[in-house]
Amino acid sequence: MLEKNLSEQILSIGNRSDRPDGGISQVLYNYRFYVFPVFKSITNFKIGSKPYKLFIAILALLKEFLILIFDKKIKIVHVHAPSDIGFRRSSYYIYLAKIFHKKIIVHIHSGRFNDYYLRHRKYVEHVFSKCDVIVALTKEIKKFYEAMGCTNVVLINNIIEVPIEKNVRYEDGLIHLLFLGSITEPKGIYDLVDVLCKHRLEFEGRIILHVGGNREVDKLLHIIETKRLDNLIKYEGWLSGERKIEMLNKCNVFILPSHTEGLPISILEAFSYGKYVVATNVGGIPEIINHVNGVMFNPMDKDALYKVLSDLLQNGLSFVDNNAIKKTVYEYMPESVEKQLSNLYNSIIDGQ
């Protein structure tokens, strides 16, 4: 944990931190319970209708205004930002913090931010000019920001929960794939469903995909029903807490066929449970997957995805060294990330 006095000087703004419903939310949840003894935070985004999301964003701006007026301990505003419209939303909290002369950290979580920058170069550069530190999730993304001319870029690893291992496994001899994330096209879930459907005669009775996610649930369930894929695909609901721990223990392969990514929390969590990972070579994923812990393929390449799954069936999983995989994520554990954040916050405060 951070020192209590230090944590009281930080105001975090981003997705909800009380109950994870996505990647940024999971990071903030982990900060709340593993890093900050006092976690001062404002939620500026929740899943819901457009009017509801607008209400949450405006309410968050009002909360920030009041906190910065009355809480004299706050010295740093740490804004956790996605890309696209989410970055523009985040920029309002940055501008407000600047009016109050606070030190500002913008923590970019999106794997699509490079594309967003190229479309909105002037706006992004103006927002970044108001920030004291820009946090990158990977070495590749850090280099991109530095190529933009930013000299205040810091690499902070994503944080994962300490794994809770249980002696529960699927013992039926099948390959049980686990997908965790939003059920949307950019996450590649429909690519995976298409591959399983096209090769169902080869995969039925040998592979089961367990899907834990939100967003386009009805669409996925409709596909499973109309194409009669219930023997291949099981929708497990949104997985968090005990249910997520259970599935991370029980399944033997984690899969994430995303079209774009930053540094997925879900992959790091899978590694912490010793799971072999199948993922696309996008964003920061090539920095964490090697010949020991997983295999990569090009995004949207369904033929390559089929070959990966076919090879797993042919070769089995006896080659997987679960203990070696677990060791690859030490630097993403709370103790390690807490030290990184402590060094960052103290350097900013000491530099005032």
Image (tube, grey):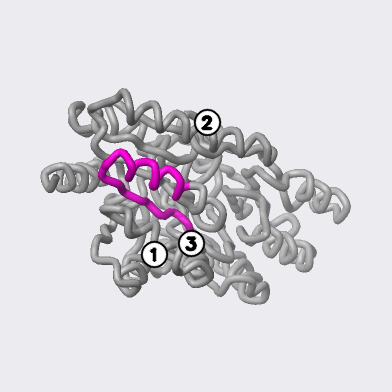
Q: Which residues are magenta?
A: 90-110
Gap between marks 1 and 3, in whole Å? 18 Å
Pointers 3 and 2 in contact (C-beta within 8 Å): no
* Corner quadrant of residue 4: top left
Whether residue 46 is visible here, answered yes or no, is yes
Q: Is residue 229 magenta?
A: no
In the image, 96 versus 104, the foreground residue is 96
Identify the residue shown where x is 66% and y is 71%: 306
Q: Tell me the residue that label 2 is attached to.
A: 59
Amino acid type indicated by mark 2: Leu
Residue lying farthest to the left in this orientation = 350
* Corner quadrant of residue 341: top left
Gap between marks 1 and 2, in whole Å? 26 Å
In the image, 328 versus 335, the foreground residue is 335
Count of marks, rendered view: 3
Q: Is residue 102 magenta?
A: yes
Label number found at residue 111: 3
Q: Is residue 289 left or right of residue 186?
A: left
Amino acid type indicated by mark 3: Gly
Amino acid type indicated by mark 1: Glu
State the SS at label 1: helix
State the SS at label 3: loop
Q: Is residue 255 left or right of residue 73?
A: right
Label number found at residue 115: none
Can you say which quadrant of the picture contains the N terminus? Answer: top left
Q: Tell me the residue that label 1 is attached to.
A: 125
Give the x, y percent position of residue 293.
Answer: 41, 61
Identify the residue shown where x is 29% and y is 25%: 71
Identify the residue shown where x is 47% and y is 35%: 61
State the SS at label 2: helix
Whether residue 168 is visible here, answered yes or no, is no
* Corner quadrant of residue 57: top right
